[in-house]
Image (tube, helix red, strand yellow):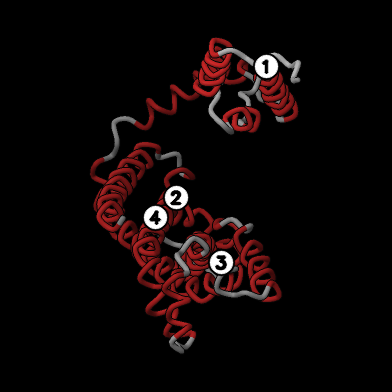
Amino acid sequence: MNTNPRPNAKSNAQANANKSANLSVNPPGQAGLNRDRPQAPGKLKHYLTAVIILLLLWGSSVDTEASLGKLIQGSPNMLDLLREMFPPKWSYFDNIVPAMLETIRMALIGTTFGAIFAVPVALLCASNLSRSAWIYQPVRFLLNLVRTIPDLLLAAIFVAIFGLGPLPGMMALTVFSFGLIAKLTYEALETIDRGPLEAMTSVGASSVQRIVFGVVPQIQAHFISYVLYTFEINVRAAAVLGLVGAGGIGHYYEVTLGFLEYDKTCMIILFTLAVVLLIDYVSTKLREKLL
């Protein structure tokens, strides 16, 4: 004879109701998801981060001897300079137009040659195209080495080698453009869809065919966008390369500042600003259509 009491219908119904309630509140697997979900950082972490940043700023200002008092102390000199710059010498416009055209040509040539040289290097740097680390790691190291040299320093080096004129400026912009475009392009190459490449490989396509028909269609819009972006930067950079004798409108900056002709300097600044804004606007519209 079985002595264990059989549960009645009421207790069974109550147990099923409790189980259903628990499942509705915490579905299967939800508890594990809640445990794995990243927790928001606490307020203490935010406070520590803010304190560290403030300490770094304070230490930097102390080491560089920069202070708000010095800024206030130099404000009268700043106002005197602005009074000497305005009104601009509008008649000086005709003198600087040829130099601005030379600056734009320098930026155009430097960007074009830099983009041409960047293409093969970007292909070698992409780890999904150059499978061997013995290839893409050394090439990336050399590329990073090139990118560490500022364009103004490059211009000064090329001026020392080739003399004064626009040629050193164009070479400096070429090297700068090469480093920037190659970096952006190889990072974009590593995000392409490998499906078309694998399909072409399965039918016996060569490496050149895979690049031309599998890689270029996926990357060409981004590449053109990078080239336009670099051209914008180069126009601004070429405007100051003349300070080290590398040609362009920067030469007039050096001359007018040296002779304290601040009204002419103001005219150059306004003209440069107008040209840069126009180029930025056109470039932005082109990049929006491409992307």
Q: Please tell me whether mark 3 or mark 4 is closer to you in this view.
A: 4
Q: Earlier in the sequence, mark 2 or mark 1?
A: 1
Q: Earlier in the sequence, mark 3 or mark 4?
A: 3
Residue ID for mark 1: 47
Measured Cα–Cα span from mark 2 to mark 1: 50 Å
Q: Please state the horizontal and vertical placement of residue 82, each as a whole percent of the image.
A: 40, 27
Q: Residue at x 38, y 54 (%)?
A: 232
Q: Please tell me whether mark 4 or mark 2 is closer to you in this view.
A: 4
Q: Earlier in the sequence, mark 2 or mark 3?
A: 3
User: The C terminus is located in which quarter?
Assistant: bottom left
Out of 286 and 168, give the one closest to the viewer.
286
Residue ID for mark 2: 255
Q: Earlier in the sequence, mark 4 or mark 1?
A: 1
Residue ID for mark 3: 159
Residue ID for mark 4: 229
Out of 66 and 60, give the one closest to the viewer.
60
Measured Cα–Cα span from mark 3 to mark 1: 50 Å
Which element type, helix, strand or loop, lies under badge 4?
helix
Name the amino acid, label 4: Tyr
Q: Residue at x 31, y 49 (%)?
A: 280
